[in-house]
Structure formats: structure tokens, C-alpha cells
Image (tube, rainbow, N blue to C red):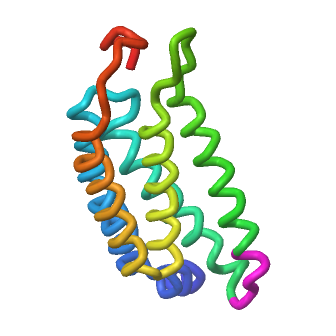
Amino acid sequence: MNWLTELFDTFDIFAHLSALGFAYVLALPIAWDRERHERSAGLRTFPLVAIATCGFVQATEGITLGNAEATARIVEGLINGVGFIGGGAILVGKAGTRGTATAASLWATGAMGTAVGLGAYDTAFVLSIVTFATLRVMANFKTEDSVFPKDER
């Protein structure tokens, strides 16, 4: 029974929960914007990307501790993985391409979750604010074309 007590003594669950919660909350404004505009990814996808990237960084802390090269490899894998997910949000049609802003904001959300996982909370906060502001403010300068019907966006 001592092994069980020792196991729970090594858990740092509140630190992990707070980091995952912070990543989740930072993703919500971006998710809300995408959901509000009926994009392919929204209120479920963005927070999941944020907590997954944060979780991968945190889950590997024990094996990468003090090894910058190992941490860089984890981050590299996350960059590629989130890029792959974002690629699925892009639709190419005869008249043009749609979904690139959603794909880019998924990538930024992955970077935000990774930053939280690495303890760079200030960077994550700035990424969240800048991504949300870009999606909201720059939408005013974009002309809506009819490349795809609304249900295919």
C-alpha cells in the first residue's frame, strides 16, 4: 500500500489542471469567433487543440527535463500535427480556397497551448489576444465571395 501513497505524492495534479484550464480558457474567444461564423472548426475543436498541445508538453516533462533538444522534438511534432489538422480545414474549389484563416487560427491555438505547457503564459496570452483580434478586426476588410455555398464553409 506504500507504493500507492508514494504514487499520489508524486502527482502534481493541480499544477497540470491549472495549466490545462488556462489553455482551455485562452482558446475560447478564438473558438467562439470561428463558431459564430459557422466555420468548420469551432467551440469544440479549438479548446481541444489547446489542451492537447499543452497536455503533450506536460506529459513529456518527465522525460525531457533539462534536455532542450528533446523538448524541441516534442514541439516539432506538435507543430506538424496541428498543421495536419489545420490542413483538413482548408477546402480548395475551382474558384478559390477557403478555410485558411481557420487553419491558421488552429495553428496559433496549438502554439498557444504549447506555450502554456512550457510555462510561457505571457506568450500564450498574447497569442490568444492577437489571434482573436486578427480574426475580428481583419474580417472587416475581407470581401465575402461566393466560392462555396454557406453550408460548405
21 to 65, vertically: above or below: above
Instruction: Locate the C terminus by quadrant.
Output: top left
Instruction: Locate the N terminus by quadrant.
Output: bottom right
- Based on the picture, tell me whether residue 121 belongs to the magenta stretch: no
**Left or right placement of residue 132 versus residue 13 in this view:** left
Quarter assignment of residue 125: bottom left
71 to 97, vertically: above or below: below
- Based on the picture, tell me whether residue 68 belongs to the magenta stretch: yes
Q: Position of residue 109 (x, y in %)?
A: 44, 55
Q: Position of residue 22 (x, y in %)?
A: 32, 69
What residue is at 57 percent from the left and 30 percent from the top?
88
Furthest residue toward bottom:
66
Residue in the foreground of this view, choosing between 134 and 36: 134
Q: Position of residue 27 (x, y in %)?
A: 33, 55
**Left or right placement of residue 100 versus residue 73 in this view:** left
Q: Position of residue 50 (x, y in %)?
A: 43, 56
Furthest residue toward right:
69
* Main SS category, magenta section: helix
What residue is at 25 percent from the left and 42 percent from the top?
33
Quarter assignment of residue 36: top left
What residue is at 65 percent from the left and 71 percent from the top?
60
Q: In the image, which residues are magenta?
A: 66-71
Residue in the foreground of this view, choosing between 27 and 104: 104
Quarter assignment of residue 21: bottom left
What residue is at 43 percent from the left and 40 percent from the top?
101
Residue in the foreground of this view, choosing between 57 and 135: 135
Marks counted in the figure total 0
